[in-house]
Amino acid sequence: MANENNPAGAVNELVDVVAKAAKQQAEVLNNAINSAVSLIEPLGKACVSFLSSVMGAAAQVYQSIADAMAPKQ
């Protein structure tokens, strides 16, 4: 090692290594979060679309039943 006799240089290298490791961990976490969001977002949109369709169909069924039961004038 170049810093065998220079404790300040060794400390600087140690700080650099720790900083790089922390930065890499933050990047990995950030990438994991972005990947999770990329997977969840389309699923959420599909669920909302599905529930909207189900609610629309239920409203149509209810309206058909209500119309059939209403007294004819």
Image (tube, grey):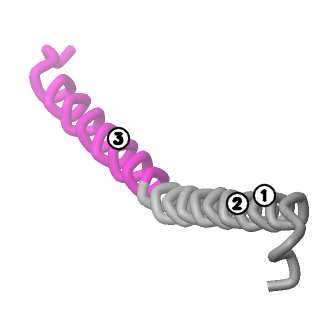
> How would you rate the neighbour count of disc 2 (Cα within 10 Å): few for under 14, some for 14-19, many for 20 or more?
few
Residue closest to the eye, 4 or 37: 4
Residue closest to the eye, 60 or 35: 35
- Residue at the (23%, 37%) spot, across then down: 58
**For the magenta stretch, what is the residue range?**
44-73
The N terminus is located in which quarter?
A: bottom right
- Residue at the (42%, 46%) spot, across then down: 48
Give the alpha-carbon distance from disc 3 to disc 2, as whole Å. Answer: 57 Å
Which residue is disc 2 drawn over? 18
Q: Nearer the viewer, mark 3 or mark 2?
A: 2
Figure check: 27 above or below 1:
above
Q: Quadrant of residue 55?
A: top left
> How would you rate the neighbour count of disc 1 (Cα within 10 Å): few for under 14, some for 14-19, many for 20 or more?
few
Label number found at residue 15: 1
| Secondary element type, mark 1 | helix
> What amino acid type should be assigned to the residue bearing mark 2?
Val
Residue 13 in the image, given as x and y percentages of width and height:
82, 67
| Secondary element type, mark 2 | helix
Type of secondary structure dominating the magenta stretch: helix
- Residue at the (56%, 56%) spot, across then down: 33
Q: Nearer the viewer, mark 1 or mark 3?
A: 1
> What amino acid type should be assigned to the residue bearing mark 1?
Val
> What amino acid type should be assigned to the residue bearing mark 3?
Gly
Q: Are marks 1 and 2 in contact (CB under 8 Å)?
A: yes
Query: Which of marks 2 and 3 precedes in the sequence?
Result: 2
Residue 6 in the image, given as x and y percentages of width and height:
89, 67
Residue closest to the eye, 48 or 23: 23
Give the alpha-carbon distance from disc 1 to disc 3, as whole Å. Answer: 61 Å
Q: Are marks 1 and 3 in contact (CB under 8 Å)?
A: no
Q: Going by the image, does 47 lie left or right of 26?
A: left
Which residue is disc 3 drawn over? 56
